[in-house]
Image (spheres, grey):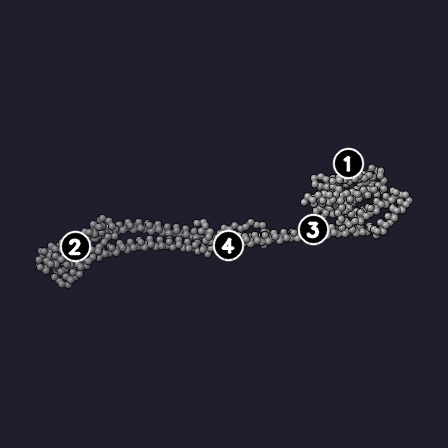
Amino acid sequence: MRTIRRLIPMTIRSKLLVSFLTMIAIFTLVGFFSYYSERYLLNRVNTLLTNNITLKEFSVNINNTITFLEQYLISRNFIMLQEYFRESQEVDAMYPNLAVIQPTMENYLLLENIRNMTRSFLQQADAAVQAKRARDSSAYSQAFFETVRYGTNINWAIDRLITSQLEENSRQYLIISQRLVFIQRLGLILIIGALIFSVLVTVWTSFRLTNPLMNLVEAAGNISKGKFDMAPLKVTTNDEVGVVTKAFNEMAADIAKLILKIKEQSDLAQRLQDQELQNLTMKNILREAELHALQSQINPHFLFNMLNAGVQLAIIEDADQTADYIDKAASLLRYNLRRLDTPVTLAEEFDHLNTYFFILSARYGKDRIKFNVELDPAIADFQLPLLTLQPIVENALIHGVEDMESGGMITVRAFSRDNLVIIQIQDNGKGMDWETLQSLRDIKRSAGHTTGLGLHNVRERLRLFFQAEDLLQISMVPEGGVLVELRLPLLKVSGKEGEDENTGS
């Protein structure tokens, strides 16, 4: 049954028709019930009155028969004889059709006596007429006397039957009247109940129809305000409103999916735009760095030729230290003038640091500042961007140990741990306060000293090279000084390790 109800939808029109037809049917049944009850009582009273009238007419015919018979016997008038025959024929035709309304034993006995006495009545009356014609006065007197006696008894029986039927009918009338009053009260109760039922059905139907519509209006208002994350509306009916609710839920879901898709596309476009902006920023940084490098070159061939001439002159004059110093300076200059987007090995960076430290030792003296370089041979072929370490060492020198009269130390060590290449640049200088350290960590642009490359430039180039964040960390050493630590992933390897990986694959 539930399946059939689901397959056959109840439309709004059918619901209204069912409600109104139900109320009409109730009022019609109440009206017909009251009408037929009253009609039954009226028919019963009419039947009783008709039967009583028939019995009275029959009694009148009996009396008329006696009257006309008596007048004929006295006057021998032919007209009286004709009237007698007409009345006796009426009595003879009526008495077989006499009936009772209340089927009781007494009434049946009375009716049967009336019929028997009527037959005897007619026989005695005919006997009186025959005796009159035969001029037998004693015979017709005796017959007339019997006729009168039967007529009297018939009238008494008729009155008794009418009285019995009236008494019984009165009792039945009281019962029927009580039933009629009950029926009227029941009809009134049914009418009041039907009115209450109609009001309840009307209210229920209106709420049943308007509540889903109000929910649809509220949901449409929420969608117009941009609230697409609402729960689907419940489909509580299987009429036109239910169909509209299902369609609205599907429409809302499609709109939410479309909005989400547009948002995802917008987010993707924003991320691409941000990435492109970062690339452009990095390109500008690299261009600025190259510009600084170009500005510092000032005709590199002329400088190289000049430094080479200085080396040859020092050799001719037997100034070996001067020749070595100029050669190291030329090597340092040559390394700094390479393209910044060229990846180099960790060994090349450390060789460049050794050259840089040689020049610094000549400048500051070996007793004032010492340099310590430690490189794990296992990661010598690890690749990283050009000029990654020198700008960090310059910061350690200038901001850490340059002002020290003696005992300055800068240590650079590189080793591997947990699939990471860790490079530490540490000095034992005066350190810095917390505000300076925080500003150095958050700094967006900083210019270098010799190379023109600051910490921000190094951090950005590492991020682009390794495609990772937070590769450069700065912290203070409890004993004094600053520690800069690079934590680089073991992803880009050249040399022997790269050849081993290619072979293994």
Q: Tag 3, which secondary structure? A: helix
Pick whichever of labels 3 and 1 is earlier in the sequence: 3
* Quarter of the rendering occupied by the C terminus: top right
Dot 1 amino acid type: Glu
Q: Report the mark closest to the observer, 4 or 1.
A: 1
Using the image as rendered, state which of residue 74 and residue 324 is in the foreground.
324
Using the image as rendered, state which of residue 37 and residue 212 is in the foreground.
212
How many angstroms separate mark 3 from mark 1 (CA)?
41 Å
Horizontal placement of 204 versus 429: left or right?
left
Horizontal placement of 454 versus 98: left or right?
right
**Residue 322 x %, y %:** 88, 43
Q: Which residue is mark 1?
A: 479
How many angstroms separate mark 4 from mark 3 (CA)?
48 Å
**Residue 421 x %, y %:** 73, 41
Q: Which residue is mark 3?
A: 275
Pick whichever of labels 2 and 1 is earlier in the sequence: 2
Q: Residue at x 80, y 49 (%)?
A: 337
**Residue 494 x %, y %:** 73, 45
Q: Which residue is mark 2?
A: 119
Horizontal placement of 185 versus 402: left or right?
left
Q: Report the mark closest to the observer, 4 or 3.
A: 3
